[in-house]
Image (tube, helix red, strand yellow):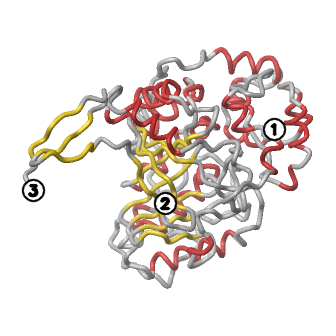
Amino acid sequence: MENQVVLPASSEGYDRDEEPPSPVAALLSGAAFDSSNLAVIAPPVTRAPRKESRAKPFAPEVSPPRARPASRTALFRRRFYPRVSPAEWRDWRWQLRNRICDVASLERIIRLSDDERDALSHEAENLPFAITPYYASLLSPSDPAQPLRRTMVPTMAELERGVGESDDPLNEEGMSPVPGLVHRYPDRVLFLVSEVCSAYCRYCTRSRVVGHHGRLGSRAERWRRAIDYIAATPTVRDVLLSGGDPLILNDDTLEWLLYNLRRIPHVEIARIGTKVPVVLPQRITRGLIQTLRRYHPLWMSIHFTHPDELTPEVARACGQLADAGIPLGSQTVLLKGINDDVETMKRLVRGLMSIRVRPYYLYQCDPIVGSGHFRTSVEKGLEIIQGLRGFTSGYAAPNYVIDAPGGGGKIPLQPNYLVGRDGDDLLLRNYRGETYRYPDPA
């Protein structure tokens, strides 16, 4: 059969970057949905000959406030990859094939501390190390305490198990009706479509499976069972694709997933959780955009950590996604010594707003094993929210949440603005610490 979207045999699937055929035409044709016939191959689609597009570029180059100069990455490429052309550097598949994954490759570009070198020698006991050449260009070559470097390069503190830490602190496996699917909330599910990321954050809450091929079982079988479960559970209206990172899958594979989810009548919304626009902005290609925009309503949550990530490359990638009609929200983990002060967080949220990303969640770091050196006090998080609320746009103030250990779900936290009651009046404290009355007869 021609024009079929075939589930790739590869577990990572980043070998193609062409615009895939669009099965959405078949979906809109009115064919009845049969949950027992979730084929691995999407229906054939007849395509009209492609005409040369005269559309305007998806997004102009936009430099957010205080973004790093574009020359930093260019200078890095010329110094460490002198034989790599600009076109190769911009190829997301080249970036993935050339990820830095070992001590020798990393020492070529940064001066490792003894602590970092020792930790890298224990990689088999921990979350793997990998980083794209693009994101490596943002790391300090000499300062182990630089925020971005701390989030990517392991230290020996990761091998320490603190009080209350566990491999699966959110009890995702206990709430998994089929492998790779978490059903915690009544109307939505978390679909772990990949075990692979383009770069590995050292505080990853899924380090028990991420980076370890096969931990979730056969991908094809896992996906079939997950989609069967969603189709058989009419309360599910919202599906979050996560992992690993869904955007390292190729366009055909993403199309297969989105098509088979959108053909389920009760699935109203699909969301993608990703850090790819930050660590691999080259992945946001015209082909990917054309694929994603077929499956609205589609939302995207992007994992940002620090304002130093707001480069022109990232601004362009987010602009392309926003121009495709995809609402963008950020998810940021509060990390000690990295983003745990008001001024750093204010720079981040304001920069995100300038590239059309709505600061959505500020997470208290999950108590994953080896995360003690990253976790702040909850009081520190409340202090940051109080320093943002009223001092920057309300759109730029994220929701501060704790994902309750044991699987209790996200619990929002706010500074206490309600002072108390005086007769028929509520006593309220504003962002400046001033007290006001609001009439509220009992």
Q: Is 208 placed above or below 82 here?
A: below
Q: Position of residue 258 (x, y in %)?
A: 49, 61
Say what secondary structure mark 1 lies in.
loop
Residue beneath disc 1 = 100
Q: Are there few (<14), some (14-19), or many (20+) residues within 10 Å of tag 2?
A: many
- Give x and y (percent) for residue 224: 59, 75
Number of residues whose C-alpha sits closer than 10 Å to that of mark 1, classed few (under 14), some (14–19) or many (20 or more): many
Rendered location of residue 415, percent (x, y): 38, 42
Instruction: Answer whether residue 14 is visible to the viewer in this image.
Output: yes
Give yes or no for contact between labels 3 and 2 (Cβ–Cβ under 8 Å): no
Q: Earlier in the sequence, mark 3 or mark 2?
A: 2
Give the residue pinned by disc 2: 240
Identify the mark nearer the N-term, 3 or 1. 1
Q: Nearer the viewer, residue 82 or 133?
A: 133
* Residue farthest to the bottom, as pictured: 36
What residue would you read off at disc 3? 442
Please tell me whether mark 3 or mark 1 is closer to you in this view. Answer: 3
Give the quadrant of residue 417.
top left
236 lies above or below 84? below
Q: Which residue is painted at 35% across and 26% down in the image?
A: 391
At label 2, the amino acid type is: Leu
Quadrant housing residue 74: top right
Circle 3: is it few (<14), some (14-19), or many (20+) Cα within 10 Å?
few
Question: In the image, 178: left or right of 11?
Answer: left
Q: Which mark is residue 168?
A: none
Marks 3 and 1, how far apart in space?
Answer: 63 Å
Circle 3/circle 1 CB separation < 8 Å:
no
Along the viewing direction, whichever of 141 and 339 lies nearer the viewer: 339
Task: Name which residue lies at 50% across and 53% down.
Answer: 402
- Identify the amino acid type marked 1: Ile
